Amino acid sequence: MLIRIPPRSRCDSSEITPESVYLSRRRFMGAGAALLGSAALPVWAQAQAPASGYEGVEPGNPPGWFAQKLDGARWKAMEVAGESITPFQDASHYNNFYEFGPDKGDPAANAGGLPTEPWTVKIDGAVGKPGQYSLEDLVQPHTLEERIYRMRCVEAWSMVIPWLGFPLGDLLKRAEPSSKAKYVSFETLSDPEHMPGQKSRFGLIDWPYREGLRMDEAMNPLTILAVGMYGRVLPNQNGAPLRLVVPWKYGFKGIKSIVRISLVEEQPYTTWQNLAPNEYGFYANVNPQVDHPRWTQARERRLPSGLFSPNVRDTLMFNGYGDEVASLYQGMDLAKYY
Ligand SMILES: Nc1nc2c(c(=O)[nH]1)N[C@H]1C(S)=C(S)[C@@H](COP(=O)(O)O)O[C@H]1N2
Ligand SMILES: [Mo]
């Protein structure tokens, strides 16, 4: 089966899951770990071989509700035209997740034991319907969509990752934000027993890790909460079981393992801005014209990247999503609000 690649990034709301993909999904999930190698891949991923990015993807150990949500998922809801998906091996072994250590390999090595089920998310603040939800109940009303997005870390490396998630805005609407809801604040789990980095106050981070968005950024259709990637449940090192993805911002805005979402009136505390406000701003929009004080942001290393094939490319304004988001910042001095 050949897959039509759209000419450029776009959201296609009319696309529905073809039956063949639906059926292959059922096989994929039903057979679970018994399926190995390419047989475990969705049909369209097999069709893209070689170098589809899906080599070595395993089903993981998803909870029952996840398999059900996959059945109804909308595949390839959004793509990055002409750019390869980063191999799963890189996306799941070159990570930033300081709760599990400072090195890129630490999250994959140390996050496996984090209990992600059951998982509760609190929604509070300026909303008509605050509450505590099991992750299953939180996701239940939403259709999972596959969003293939560029991911640009502030450290000047980047990937292309196929996430599985749903628009954050749909969740927020259900909570009925009041007129006082001007920003959204997010918090990662506190669990020093399973997150060794939280014991050491590594890098002077004031745990838990926190992030935030302006309300209109949170409601933008590109902003998603992800529960999976590469057609499977999120690996722990990538922020299981629930993480934020904001593709036009630097990767550190994509807070992992979220336990609390609060609607607030004032611009919220965010971890990196608090650590080094002259280096990391609240907005953190990808911007090749505003350099980090210690390095240029005009270029990036696209993974996989090696000594002999560094795979360097120009960084795009708003990470290539300007059509969708530039209007959010009209009239703002982006050198000041970096
Ligand atoms: N809780 C938490 N979330 C986090 C981080 C972290 O250290 N802790 N690192 C951020 C940074 S700097 C990046 S680049 C991305 C990396 O996501 P990935 O490992 O899935 O590629 O996660 C972000 N979310
Ligand atoms: Mo990052």
Image: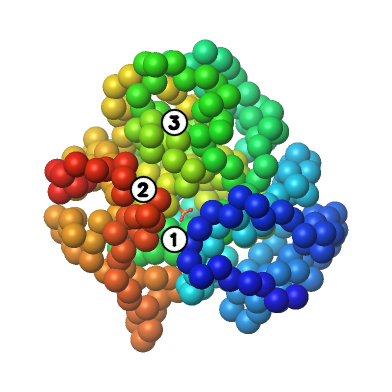
> Of discs 1 and 3, which sits in the foreground?
1
Residue at 55 percent of width and 57 percent of height: 78
Please tell me how crowded label 2 is: few (under 14), some (14-19), or many (20+) other residues with Cα within 10 Å. some
- Between the residue at mark 2 and the residue at mark 3, the CA separation in whole angstroms equals 24 Å
Return the disc, 2 or 3, that comes first in the chain's sequence.
Answer: 3
Q: Which residue is mark 2?
A: 325
Q: Which percent across, then down, holds residue 219?
A: 45, 35
- Between the residue at mark 1 and the residue at mark 3, the CA separation in whole angstroms equals 23 Å
Q: Which residue is mark 1?
A: 150
Q: Are marks 2 and 1 in contact (CB under 8 Å)?
A: no
User: Residue 117: which disc?
Assistant: none
Relative height, residue 22 to residue 81 (above, below): above
SS at mark 2 in the image: helix
Residue at 71 percent of width and 54 percent of height: 16
Quadrant in the picture for residue 310: bottom left
Please tell me how crowded label 1 is: few (under 14), some (14-19), or many (20+) other residues with Cα within 10 Å. many
Q: Ligand 1 within 8 A of label 2's CB?
A: no
Residue at 59 percent of width and 46 percent of height: 165
Quadrant in the picture for residue 333: top left
Q: Which percent across, then down, holds residue 321?
A: 39, 56
- Between the residue at mark 2 and the residue at mark 1, the CA separation in whole angstroms equals 15 Å
Report the amino acid beneath label 1.
Arg
